[in-house]
Image (cartoon, rainbow, N blue to C red):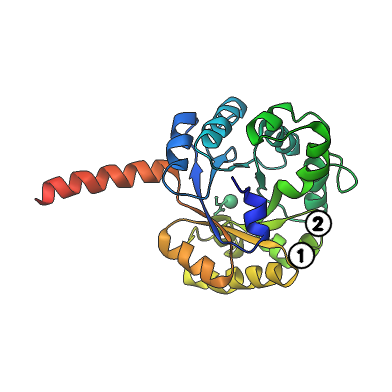
Amino acid sequence: MTGLAERLRSGETLISGWTQLPEPLVAELVARQGFDAVAMDMQHGLHDLQSVMRSITGVAYAGKPAVVRIAVGDNATASRVLDFGAEAVIAPMINTAADAKALVAATKYPPVGDRSWGPIRALTVLGVPDLPTQLHTANQTTMVFAMVETARALDVVDEILGVEGLDGVFMGPSDLSVTLSGGKEIAATAAWLDEPIRRLADRANAVGKIAGAFAVNPARARFFIECGYRFVALGADQTYLAEGAKAMLAAVKAS
Ligand code: 3PY
Ligand code: MG
């Protein structure tokens, strides 16, 4: 299995599933629907460390890379989920270069960062043959994304993108709409977000970093890909379930 980092670094565009239900069977099921990766959301989702640890195993069993969104500022968990075998971490609300540096410090081994040693479960999940291989390859084979999702972050986006060891940015349209409107609107699909969204992808691509984004629906995913985003998360498990159930029931009632 080619890993997430290798595929993204080679120029592919990947679409990830997203889970919030703290149940490994759900993550595995999502992984089996054709997504390139599956994310577990510890910020707004219901996942905890146990469900993430077990979901990473379920996703790996389906042959897909696992990604974890940590809670705000929770860099200790960033390094733990990499130890569990996650191939990427998404960190929300990164508003300054200092935030990004602290994130990189927790998730990359020296000399890039200060990640502490202890990836025993990751070796099993990812099939890393030995400890030296892990030490010498993990900084490349795992990725760390800083969520740029506030007006403050957009103001200093080039400084954030300039942090050594940061693999990419990940755009959150909901928080972006709330902060850019000064708290007046929650409008993840609003047309007035298109310009800053396009600019963020351009800034990331200009310096060779991966642009990622959260798409609330397929139309936004297509737009983001057209803008140059290459790591796009689409919807979430509760929506997959609700939309699937509603569509099946409506089809019966319509017949
Ligand atoms: C946002 O849109 O703010 C997000 O964090 C997406 O998950
Ligand atoms: Mg957000």
Residue 149 is situated, as x and y percent measured from the top left of the image, at: 63, 57
Residue 33 is situated, as x and y percent measured from the top left of the image, at: 41, 45
Secondary structure of the residue carrying tag 1 is loop
Asked if disc 1 and disc 2 are in contact, CB closer than 8 Å, the reply is yes
Query: In this picture, is 244 found above or below 217?
Result: above
- Snapshot quadrant of residue 70: top right
| Rendered residue at 53%/61% (across/down) | 184
Q: Amino acid at mark 1?
A: Val
Q: Residue furthest right?
A: 111
Q: Which residue is mark 2?
A: 97
Q: Amino acid at mark 2?
A: Ala
Judging depth in this view, the residue of 24 and 187 nearest the camera is 24
| Rendered residue at 54%/32% (across/down) | 55
- Snapshot quadrant of residue 159: bottom right
Number of numbered tags placed on the structure image: 2
Can residue 124 be seen by looking at this rendering?
Answer: yes
Q: Which badge, 1 or 2, is on the more N-terminal residue?
A: 2
| Left or right: residue 210 compared with residue 186 | right
Secondary structure of the residue carrying tag 2 is helix
Q: Which mark is residue 141?
A: none
| Left or right: residue 246 compared with residue 97 | left
Query: In this picture, is 82 found above or below 158?
Result: above
| Rendered residue at 50%/45% (across/down) | 18
Q: Residue furthest front?
A: 129
| Rendered residue at 70%/57% (across/down) | 168
Q: Which mark is residue 156?
A: 1
Of the 4 image quadrants, the one containing the N terminus is top right
Can residue 183 be seen by looking at this rendering?
Answer: no
Query: In this picture, is 114 found above or below 157?
Result: above
- Snapshot quadrant of residue 83: top right
